[in-house]
């Protein structure tokens, strides 16, 4: 791929509706995308190629990290990225090879040491910051620790220690009624790392004992930072990312994208930023989180409303005159399942050089009839590059 990259002034926009794919709420009914009134997406579909993408293979349900890596053209199985590293990157940790990252929660323990609230009453971000400052003073020989607040009870956690192990169990039991778990190592290299982490957690519990409701922390998703070739090296693209949530900003950084400033933390703010930065980049990744949030909550109508809001911004995108536009998702999150799922994700590929399918609807069943077929999500980036005139001929 790298040898085929050709210079071009063309511009590509990748619009990712997180958890886009869905299911009908009654047998024979319509999915969230099919239910939504989307005149602009349907009009664009008429001029586009349609299909369904699979992030990591048939039947495999993925998290947003692997789902995004596949959309960005990286093998999500080979490049296995833990959620902890993505969260840390999302709050601007400059992770290095000796940094172990994890997702963290403040939680509430009762007098017996059992978890009664995994989110500590969703304490305010300001209160969480005070507690993080307290824990950041913990000193343990052989390691450095830092907590950085994301929002409310959630934080990114990083331990810096020479050659840390990464095969480590979570301390979050994922349910109430039991105690937080000790970190268990999964291999010999991880034994010292687990011991240091457990020492930190023991001291954290002592320091937080008199604080209510946040009197303990829990960690999960321990991971090290993998190395990926950047969009610039791999595709010859100067890429900008528009995302409001930390993990998605993190995966964009990992791919070598510039995370662009968004003045107003709303969907409207993202599209305003697209216009403001449009002349300076030739690839844009735009992330919409609310589709996934509604899907995981089981809010079918809420997910429909978010899709309809996105549809109203399609003319704004097209007025910028991009050469290639992909509208898709990183995975499916059907509201009827209230979770991520393995179902292939609708994909729409508009291009000036494309072959339109002539299907004037954007939905799961319409995409099943499209010329893209059911394809690995990893194959979408080469298609975007080709349609943007950014790939040379292979061979004589």
Image: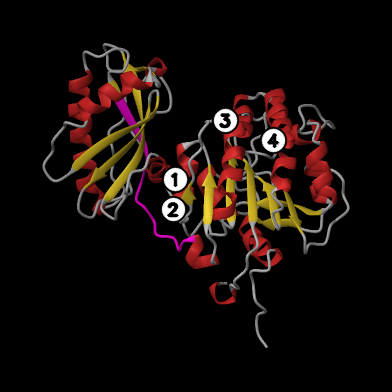
Q: Alpha carbon of mark 1 to alpha carbon of mark 4: how far?
A: 23 Å
* Residue 199 in view (yes/no): yes
Circle 4 Cα neighbour tier, 10 Å, few/some/many (<14 / 14–19 / ≥20): some
Q: Which residue is mark 1?
A: 250
Q: Does label 1 or label 3 sit earlier along the sequence?
A: 1
Q: Which of the labelled discs sits on residue 254, or is there none?
A: 2
Q: Which residue is mark 3?
A: 266
Q: Position of residue 257 (x, y in %)?
A: 48, 53
Quadrant in the picture for residue 194: top left
Q: Alpha carbon of mark 1 to alpha carbon of mark 2: how far?
A: 6 Å
Q: How is the image coloured?
A: secondary structure
Q: Position of residue 341 (x, y in %)?
A: 63, 39
Taking the image as shown, residue 48 lies to the left or right of residue 102, namely: right
- Of labels 1 and 4, the one closer to you: 4
Q: Residue at x 39, y 59 (%)?
A: 227
Q: Does label 2 or label 3 sit earlier along the sequence?
A: 2
Magenta-span inclusion, residue 221? yes
């Amino acid at each position: 791929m790298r040898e085929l990259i050709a210079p071009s002034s063309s511009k590509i926009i990748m619009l990712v509706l997180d958890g886009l794919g869905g299911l009908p709420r009654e047998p024979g009914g319509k999915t969230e995308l099919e239910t939504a009134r989307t005149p602009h997406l349907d009009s664009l579909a008429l001029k586009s190629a349609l299909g369904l993408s699979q992030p990591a293979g048939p039947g495999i349900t993925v998290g947003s990290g692997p789902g995004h890596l596949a959309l960005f053209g990286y093998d999500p199985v080979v490049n296995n990225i833990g959620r902890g590293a993505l969260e840390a990157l999302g709050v601007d940790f400059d992770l290095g090879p000796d940094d172990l990252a994890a997702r963290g929660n403040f939680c509430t323990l009762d007098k017996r040491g059992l978890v009664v609230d995994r989110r500590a009453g969703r304490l305010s971000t300001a209160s969480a910051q005070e507690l993080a400052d307290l824990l950041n003073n913990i000193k343990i020989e052989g390691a450095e620790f830092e907590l950085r607040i994301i929002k409310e009870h959630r934080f990114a956690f990083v331990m810096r220690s020479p050659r840390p192990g990464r095969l480590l169990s979570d301390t979050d039991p994922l349910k109430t009624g039991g105690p937080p778990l000790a970190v268990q190592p999964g291999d010999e290299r991880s034994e010292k790392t687990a011991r240091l982490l457990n020492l930190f957690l023991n001291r954290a519990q002592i320091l937080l004992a008199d604080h209510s409701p946040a009197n303990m922390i829990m960690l999960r998703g321990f991971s090290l930072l993998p190395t990926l070739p950047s969009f610039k090296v791999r595709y010859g693209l100067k890429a900008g990312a528009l995302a409001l949530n930390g993990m998605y900003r993190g995966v964009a950084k990992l791919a070598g994208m510039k995370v662009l400033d968004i003045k107003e933390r709303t969907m409207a703010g993202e599209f305003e930023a697209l216009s403001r930065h449009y002349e300076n980049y030739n690839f844009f990744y735009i992330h919409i989180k609310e589709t996934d949030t509604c899907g995981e909550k089981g809010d079918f109508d809420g997910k429909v409303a978010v899709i309809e809001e996105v549809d109203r911004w399609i003319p704004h995108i097209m007025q910028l005159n991009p050469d290639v536009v992909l509208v898709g998702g990183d995975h499916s999150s059907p509201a009827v399942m209230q979770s991520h799922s393995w179902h292939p994700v609708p994909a729409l590929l508009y291009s000036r050089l494309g072959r339109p399918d002539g299907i004037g609807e954007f939905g799961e069943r319409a995409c099943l009839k499209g010329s893209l077929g059911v394809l690995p999500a990893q194959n979408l980036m080469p298609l975007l590059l080709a349609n943007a005139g950014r790939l040379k001929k292979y061979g004589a």
